Image (cartoon, rainbow, N blue to C red):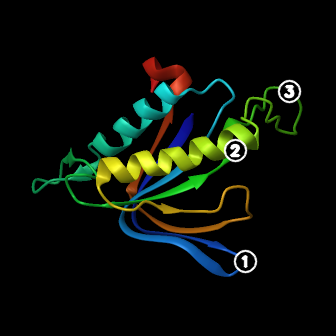
Amino acid sequence: MRAVIQRVTQASCTVDNQVTGTIQHGLLVLLGVEEADTADDMKWLAQKLVNLRIFSDEAGLMNRSIQDIRGNILLISQFTLLAQTKKGNRPSFIRAAKPEKAKPMYEEMAVLLSTLLNKEVQLGIFGADMKIDLCNDGPVTIIMNTQDKDNF
């Protein structure tokens, strides 16, 4: 799984002029599921997301997690995170999981994060043309890749 994690003061997802998810103060997580991903990868990433200390404490240092601040998560599926651009100018998405694998993993990630946070995670709509509005706080943006845990 690849994730782009953005600390935000607000974020929302709109599909066909309908808001599907909206948060204040928390994390916008763009999630790409790879064919090689497993349930263990999902659990590892979920634990990292809820424990990642990227929110400021009283001294202005990044010492607090999303759990500590009782923040929210907006989770968006995004297969384009798996783009390969080595050859030519048209990205290849061959590593991205097919929808029959990716959608259940995206939905399971939402349930897992909701359980870990003890609150509902806001969502986009898998496979839809989504419009994401956000205010990146900091800016703080982090990339994680479960297939390369040692380097992320």
Mark 2, Cα crowd under 10 Å, few <14 / some 14-19 / many 20+, is many
* Lateral position of residue 72 relative to residue 96, left or right: left
Q: Which residue is mark 1?
A: 16
Q: CA distance from mark 3 to mark 2?
A: 18 Å
> What residue appears at the point 73 percent right and 62 percent down from the top-left corner?
128
Identify the secondary structure beneath mark 1. loop
Residue placed most toward the observer, 109 or 142: 109
Residue 65: image x %, image y %? Answer: 25, 48
Report the Cα–Cα distance between label 3 and label 1.
Answer: 34 Å
Q: Position of residue 43 (x, y in %)?
A: 42, 33
Q: Residue at x 28, y 41 (%)?
A: 51
Is residue 8 shown left or right of residue 124? left
Left or right: 21 as drawn, with respect to 97: left
Q: Secondary structure at mark 2?
A: helix
x%, y% of residue 126? 67, 56
Query: Which-is-in-front pick, marks 3 and 2?
Result: 2
Q: Identify the mark nearer the N-term, 1 or 2.
A: 1
Q: Describe the element under mark 3 as helix, strand or loop.
A: loop
Which one is closest to the eye, mark 3 or mark 1? 1
Q: Position of residue 81 (x, y in %)?
A: 66, 41
The residue wearing badge 2 is 79
What's under tag 1, amino acid-wise?
Asp
The amino acid type found where label 3 is placed reads Lys
Answer above or below: position of 131 versus 41. Answer: below
Q: CA distance from mark 1 to mark 2?
A: 20 Å
